[in-house]
Structure formats: C-alpha cells, structure tokens
Image (spheres, rainbow, N blue to C red):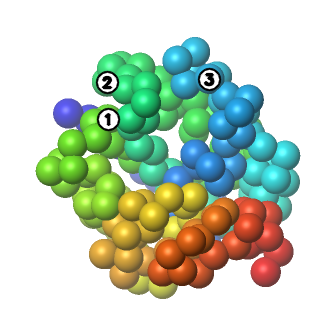
Amino acid sequence: MNRYKFLLNQPVVPSDTIGLFPWGTIIDSAASNITDQYFVCSDEGSHFLNKIASTTSVVLFINQFKLTPLSMADFQELANSIEGLVKQHGVTVKGTYWAPGFDQHDPYVVPNPGMFRRATENIGINWSNIKVLSAFDDDLVAAKKVKAIPIKIGSNKNKSFTSFKSILEWADS
C-alpha cells in the first residue's frame, strides 16, 4: 500500500526543514470540506506559509479522519490537495506521508512513528532536532519517538510539549 510521495533530485531546496501536520495548524477546518476534497488555508496558515517559503521546506504528514473515514483513493486525493495548497504558497514539499487508516496497531498510524521512519528511508532525514508542528498530541508523541522536537500549535492542556497559540506565533518566535 503506497503511503507516501517524495521527490528525488529536487532543485534548490531550503536547508531548514520542518515536519508539519496541516490539519489544525494551517488548514481552516471550519471552511474546509473533507468529503469534497476542498481545503482552505487559514489566514494565519497562509501568512505562515508565505513567511517560510524561501527559507524552509516541509515534510507533510496527513492522518485519516475518524469522523469521516476516506477510501484509499480519496485519501490520496486529499493528500495531493493539501500538498498543492502548500505548494501554491511557494513552499518546497520534500515529501508527503499519510496514514490511510486509524487502527492503532498500524505502524504508520500515530502515535506510532512509521510515517517518520519512512521519510528517513526515502529522503534521508535525521529527525533529531527537527521541529514538527501539530495541533494534536498523538502526532507529537510519534515525533518524539524519532527524537524530533514536538511543537504543539493551539491549546496545550497537558503541558507535555512546547506550545504556541498559533502557527504564526511560532514562526514569529
């Protein structure tokens, strides 16, 4: 089962890399529609992407939605749509990795680190000291398992991770 897409022999790629789970960080969930594959960047998400476009490349991680599970084909379209949204802002996407299910025994479903390990195999990323941004704890638990620096965007009730109220606040820090 194909769970990723990455580019080989990319042109000049910014040297700084982050991992990004887009839902809740850059995607406006209220204005987006999962079923119709229609995604809207939040205003802060757009400003964030524009701000990092020339300096930072991203590895995208996309999870299945438990409330509206998608078929594999629909899920691949979802991943392509989100990747396209990020690229429209001029951001280099090193790779896009997705978990099309939500069975916690699947090594690719967070909090398991399979998507991160696949990125290491494909594009040689050593996650140590690379920042990974997400609005959800399970994503950050997976990031921590590969020694990445987990950054929580939004409310951080359990205080396990460094947090920022918004992705733009993190970019400005």
For mark 2, give the secondary structure. Answer: helix
Q: Residue furthest front?
A: 157
In terms of sequence position, does the residue under pointer 2 or pointer 1 come before the other? 2
Tag 1 residue: 100
* Residue 154 appears anywhere in the view: yes
- Residue 172 location, x and y as percent? 82, 74
Amino acid at dot 2: Met
Distance CA(mark 1)–CA(mark 3): 17 Å
Q: Which amino acid, by three-letter code, is at mark 3?
A: Asn
Image side of residue 81 versus residue 69, left or right: right
Please, what is the three-letter code of the amino acid marked with disc 1? Answer: Pro
As drawn, 169 above or below 101: below
Instruction: Please indicate, yes or no, whether residue 15 appears anywhere in the rendered image.
Output: no
Position of the C terminus by quadrant:
bottom right
Question: Could you classify mark 2 by the number of other residues whose Cα lies within 10 Å: few (under 14), some (14-19), or many (20 or more)?
Answer: some
Which residue: 42% across, 60% down?
139
Q: Tell me if 65 is positioned left or right of 107 in this view.
A: right
Mark 1 vs mark 3, foreground winner is: 3
Up-down relation of residue 38 to residue 92 (above or below): above
Mark 3, residue position: 33
Residue 72, numbered circle: 2
Q: Badge 3 local density, few (<14 within 10 Å), some, or many (20+)?
A: few
Q: Nearer the viewer, residue 96 or 39?
A: 39
Q: Earlier in the sequence, mark 1 or mark 3?
A: 3
Q: Are marks 2 and 1 in contact (CB under 8 Å)?
A: yes
The location of residue 103, given as percent across then percent down, is 21, 42
Mark 2 / mark 3, whichever is N-terminal: 3
Q: Which is closer to the viewer, label 2 or label 3?
A: 3
The residue shown at (28%, 41%) is: 102
